[in-house]
Amino acid sequence: MTHSHRLDGSKEIYKKGVVTMKRLLLFLVIFTEFLSAEGVVKKALFDLTTSELATLEKRLIGGVAFSTAHYQSVNAKLDKIVVIHGGAYKFFVKDISKTKCKPDPAFQAKAKEIHEKLASLAKTYHVKFLMCGVGMKAKGIKKENILAFVKIAPSAMVALIDAQNDGYAIIPIN
């Protein structure tokens, strides 16, 4: 075997080693990116004031499902809080006739279905619902007349301030 033949063999081994190292480095970079995305928590605060049924269905019910699926697809978690006030109280009461909320025949025809969808957001998507306590009093809404998964906040303003100070991104739905 000549000296040049041995050098050619060494060059080939060196090239294979470089290719292997590049592949290993690429794998480590991708793996590190995957691990760094794992455990990432995004925070969304839905400021719900709409009285429009279509807006509630599209922007809240549809929006929560879409956003949650998106963040799951990139190995992140989405924490969700909904603050209920303004015109949105009616969507979360069991019997609107026992409140000062204005009756809404379109909603009342679908109330059972909407209540089930909202309950599913709480159970399946782990959405935390907070109703403004000040507005409840003004609307004559008793605690026993709100849906079981809804908690009462001292006020919408307090709930919004607390969540924003905890790093939640605010999404107005009005």
Image (cartoon, rainbow, N blue to C red):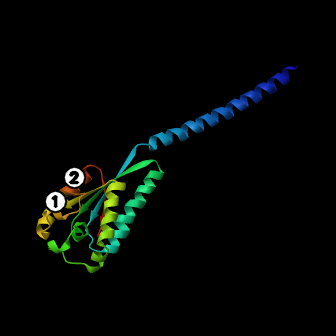
Q: Amino acid at mark 2?
A: Asp
Give the residue at mark 1. Answer: 155
Q: Nearer the viewer, mark 1 or mark 2?
A: 1
**Residue 122 pos. (x, y %):** 31, 57
Kind of residue at disc 1: Ser
Q: Position of residue 55 (x, y in %)?
A: 34, 72
Identify the residue at image location x=44%, y=56%. 69
Indicate left or right for 126 with 38 as reference.
Answer: left
The residue shown at (39%, 65%) is 62
Q: Position of residue 144 (x, y in %)?
A: 16, 62
| Secondary structure found at label 2 | helix
Image quarter (top left, top right, bottom left or bottom right) of the N terminus:
top right
Q: Which quadrant does the C terminus fall into?
A: bottom left
Q: Which mark, residue 96?
A: none
Q: Answer left or right for 37 relative to 138.
A: right
Between residue 45 and residue 23, name the one nearer to us: 45
Mark 2 = which residue?
162
Residue in view at x 74 percent, y 27 percent: 13
